[in-house]
Amino acid sequence: MLLSKFYEYLNLPEKTYLGSRVAKKQLIENSQLTSADKKAVQEDIEAIVWRNTLKNTTVNISPYHEIVESSANDLDKDTDSESYVLEYNEIAVIEVTIRSTKRAKKIAELIQRAIPYPLFIVLHLKHVTEESEPSITLNLATKRLSKADHSKLKVERFYQSPALTLEQLTSGSIEEVFLKSLTVEKQSFVNFYEFYMGWVKQFLALEKSKHTNEFSESESQSVDIDQAKLQASVLDSIASLEAKLSGIRQKIKQEGQINRKVELNIQAQKIKQKLNKQKETLSVGGL
């Protein structure tokens, strides 16, 4: 019921349905997977289905292809700034039935790296377990290809929802508003890049809601990609600062020397100030 409700919200055109099973073997045989990765695939994945394909023959959206050239100055500043290709010719919706949510993030990221297309991954925990009730976890990833070698894929950033349950989808809840914001009709039909970035925009709004306690759904279908990237950068900075603050607080608890505790408390206060400033940017900075 939860899964069908989600697809009802997403409202994908019937012509996009494929429903083709993908063998786990295809993932496991990927030479880049570690033994821990392969164990996660074997133990946690029950089934993988390539559920939908959105392409210009199934929806009225144009493919997107852009070569982004890097200047010599860029290369001097950042060794990762090689010329790259943005290729959004189609979007696949991949449904993964999982046995546990413990390694859901790892599973989604493995699949995103294994398939060079833009993917919308739906991780479905179908059965009640000791740790959790049935849920769906959604995952996106922005990707680019090396201009010199199209087989080299780089994931720019992952976007993942928390595990969403049926009980959370009450009328007007953040979770329900978020899922409704993903409906196909609300996205930009200019090209597949803008369409996908429209979904990214809603995932960022959900991420932001953890700090603002509200989900701000944009009424506009257009996507300000530069603003989305800036918002992602601020959210990443907040996550990094929160991790540092948590680590210092743990050290304070374990520290026996008073002088050292004072030093750690000063560090914690400085990080807290930076954290509050970044959160303020989210609230009043138009992000």
Image: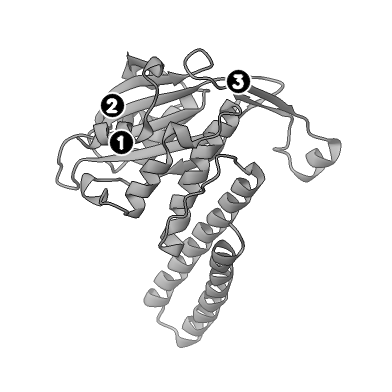
Q: CA distance from mark 2 to mark 1?
A: 26 Å
Q: Which residue is mark 3?
A: 63
Q: Of residues 165 and 57, which is closer to you in this image?
A: 57
The x, y position of residue 92, in whole percent, is 45, 23
Mark 2 closeness class: few <14, some 14–19, many ≥20 residues within 10 Å: some
In which quadrant of the rendered view does residue 9 lie?
top left
Residue at the (54%, 54%) spot, across then down: 236
Earlier sequence position, callout 2 versus callout 1 = 1
> Residue at the spot x=51%, y=27% of the render?
118
Image check: 119 left or right of 147? Answer: left
Residue 42 is tagged as 2
* Colouring: one colour
Residue located beneath label 1 in the image: 6
In which image quadrant can residue 66 be found?
A: top right
Comparing labels 2 and 1, the label whose residue is closer to the camera: 1
Residue toward you, 207 or 184: 184
Question: Exactly how many numbered labels are in the figure?
Answer: 3
In terms of sequence position, does the residue under pointer 3 or pointer 1 come before the other?
A: 1
Q: State if disc 1 and disc 2 touch (CB < 8 Å).
A: no
Q: Residue 183 at what x, y percent from top left? A: 41, 35
Residue that protrudes farthest toward the bottom in the picture: 258
Tell me the number on the disc at residue 240: none
SS for dot 3 = loop
Label 2 residue SS: helix
* Left/right of residue 107 with respect to residue 74 in the rendered view: left
Label 3: how many Cα within 10 Å (few below 14, some 14–19, many 20+)? some
Which residue is at a point 50% across and 84% down the rendered structure image? Answer: 262
Q: Amino acid at mark 1?
A: Phe
Residue type beneath disc 2: Gln
Amino acid type indicated by mark 3? Pro
Q: Which residue is located at x 46 percent, y 45 percent?
A: 203
Find residue 281 and report its image quarter: bottom right
